[in-house]
Amino acid sequence: MPDKERQASATLLAVDELKRLIFTGELSADSDHLESELASRLGMSRTPVREAALKLETLGLLQVRPRKGVRIAALSMQDMTDIYDLLIQLEGHAAGLAAAAGHSRQDLAQLRGSIREMEAMLWADNRIEWAKADERFHNELISLGGNDRLAGFVAMLNDQVRRARNITLKLRPSLAKSNEDHQRLFRAVVKGDGELARELLVEHRRRAAGSLLELLQQMGLKRV
């Protein structure tokens, strides 16, 4: 593999690993880290770590501080509220586009598969795998909307609230209602009803956001 390709591959790996450490809380909000420390932790040189940090800074996940390393970004409750306000509207629009696109049953196979996986994980009481299937459902729905720029904005916003979702996952009330929401949304997409799909997605996300913010307050977390 040429040196440039090898370097690019190492940077992508560093991005993925740093994201994982941030989302799981292993690199906690407001904590400071030297590039050399992170490079040692990831088992790679400082160059891909530095490039990965610059990429993650554009996503709002950390701040690069010259000669001081990086600081992991924190989100306040107000930040969370503001981000969800945007996320809900963007995802709602994407859901409407997906339904109006007139996709075939075959096109919707992955969406249907994610719903089945969520049902299976609900019965198995496996919230971690349920959350992965839930994320696949929403990512596929947005992809079906066909607007790549919108999908990019949604992915960026989702990255910023992922830590909070992970923190509250085990404390969330029954996931059965969420599964019902996904099934209703899927039926709206199958029918090609863009307005209904948008309304259902907005309702679903608003309820989920409200539950998440309430749990964070109960846990006494002002910054995540």
Image (spheres, rainbow, N blue to C red):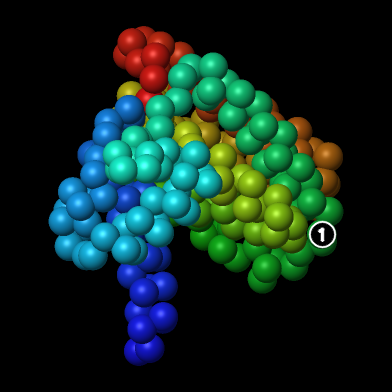
- Whether residue 176 is situated above or below residue 64 in the rendered picture: above
- Residue 223 x, y percent position in the rendering: 39, 20
Is residue 55 visible from the viewing direction of this image? yes
- Whether residue 68 is situated above or below residue 83 in the rendered picture: below
Residue beneath the point at 34% across and 35% down: 71
Give the residue type that dot 1 points to.
Answer: Ala
Q: Which secondary structure, mark 1?
A: loop
Q: Quadrant of the C terminus?
A: top left
- Residue 112 x, y percent position in the rendering: 57, 57
Residue beneath the point at 65% across and 53% down: 151
In this rendered view, identify the residue nearer to me: 159 or 132: 159
Q: Which residue is mark 1?
A: 101
Is residue 126 visible from the viewing direction of this image? no
Residue beneath the point at 36% across and 74% down: 7
Q: Quadrant of the N terminus?
A: bottom left
Residue beneath the point at 40% across and 65% down: 12
Quadrant of the image occupied by residue 83:
top right
Using residue 160 as the reference point, say whether residue 146 is left or right of it: right
Seen from this angle, which residue lies furthest bottom?
A: 1
Using residue 186 as the reference point, say whether residue 65 is left or right of it: left
In this rendered view, identify the residue nearer to me: 167 or 22: 22
How many numbered discs sit on the rendered protein? Answer: 1
Seen from this angle, which residue lies furthest front?
A: 67
Quadrant of the image occupied by residue 9:
bottom left
- Residue 95 x, y percent position in the rendering: 72, 46
Using residue 159 as the reference point, say whether residue 71 is left or right of it: left
- Residue 133 x, y percent position in the rendering: 45, 51
- Whether residue 8 is situated above or below residue 137 in the rendered picture: below
In this rendered view, identify the residue nearer to me: 135 or 122: 135
